[in-house]
Image: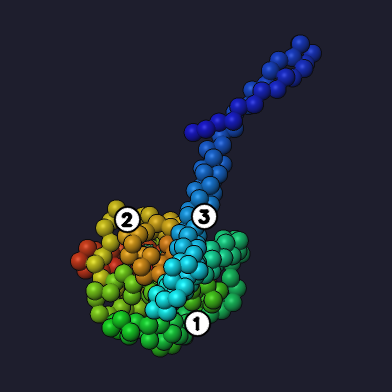
Amino acid sequence: TTYRVQTSAIEGADGGGVLVSFEDITDMETAGRMRRDFVANVSHELRTPLTALLGFIETLKGAARDDAAARERFLDIMEREATRMNRLVADLLSLSRVEAAERVRPTELVDLTALVKASIAAIRPIAADQGITLEYLGPEDALEVRADADQITQVMHNLIENAIKYGSTGEKVTVAVSHEERDISLRGPAVRIDVIDRGDGIDPIHIPRLTERFYRIDDHRSRERGGTGLGLAIVKHIVNRHRGRFRIESERGVGSRFSISLPMG
Ligand code: ADP
């Protein structure tokens, strides 16, 4: 615990004295440190692709100037690095937008059955390219909750894309929607969405940290697959804004299940 100690002189009829006050600033210190860490992380994440880009520009202007094949190859790498920067900036903007709106509850009525099915349809071709089938399990009828449709769509994309990226040893990813009469921790009716993969699973020591910004279990694998390390942090904030809950369960060698529950009404 950190205290800020302040002393001030006070005057009184009996000659006065000194007032000493203690203020607990532990939270403020933690917030300050987290902000500094975040800025350092962002700078590092942006600098890596930038350094690569500058290196390739240099090579293209010099050694590779007259080598058409090398030029082609380098341009491909440059495109990939620039795409990575673009994705990172887009995720940073999403995160800051979600954080800014976190106190404002969404008011729009959204049919989650239709939303989930639309997300599956949008990602299905990408999954198919990697030999993965996306399966929908759930009702056909509408299930409505007060939500921000764009944000919940983003949640679905982040979770399903992760299941494809990291759960790819399994051939099937299941997205299940269900109506819960009474969610125990939300104390009322809820719609629950599960994204289930049959991948390698996650070691339990990592699970509590997965929603931290830039936390990755396997740095190389995440980067190779175009990950920004912000996907689950964004999911957590969006679910918080909806006053819902987000759970991760996983078993090594079996797969993982990422679940969100959103309150109805
Ligand atoms: P990234 O952009 O790296 O995918 P995320 O915030 O979406 O960032 O995920 C953080 C980390 O959680 C990933 O780098 C990966 O190590 C792990 N992870 C996420 N989803 C899964 C999954 N379905 N199976 C195994 N590991 C996962």
Q: Residue furthest right?
A: 13
- The circle on residue 215 is none
Q: Secondary structure at mark 3?
A: helix
Task: Name which residue type carries label 3.
Answer: Ser
- The circle on residue 111 is 1
Ligand 1, what quadrant?
bottom left
Query: Label 2 crowding class (10 Å Cα cut-off): few <14, some 14-19, many 20+?
Result: few
Residue at 41% over, 67% down: 227
Q: Is mark 2 within 8 Å of ligand 1?
A: yes
Location of residue 204 in the rendering, given as x and y in whole percent from the top left corner: 28, 56
Location of residue 188 in the rendering, given as x and y in whole percent from the top left corner: 45, 67
- Is 145 placed left or right of 257 in the picture? right
Q: CA distance from mark 3 to mark 2?
A: 24 Å
Q: Secondary structure at mark 2?
A: loop
Marks 1 & 3, CB-CB < 8 Å contact: no
Q: CA distance from mark 1 to mark 3?
A: 39 Å
Q: Nearer the viewer, residue 241 or 82?
A: 82
Q: Residue furthest left?
A: 253
Query: Label 1 crowding class (10 Å Cα cut-off): few <14, some 14-19, many 20+?
Result: some
Task: Name which residue type carries label 1.
Answer: Asp
Q: Nearer the viewer, residue 15 or 8?
A: 8
Q: CA distance from mark 2 to mark 1?
A: 33 Å
**According to the image, label 2 marks what residue?**
206
Query: Residue 175 is drawn in which quadrant?
Result: bottom left
Disc 3 versus disc 2: nearer the observer: 3
Instruction: Please report whichever mark, 1 or 3, sits nearer to the chain's N-terminal start.
Output: 3
**According to the image, label 3 marks what residue?**
43
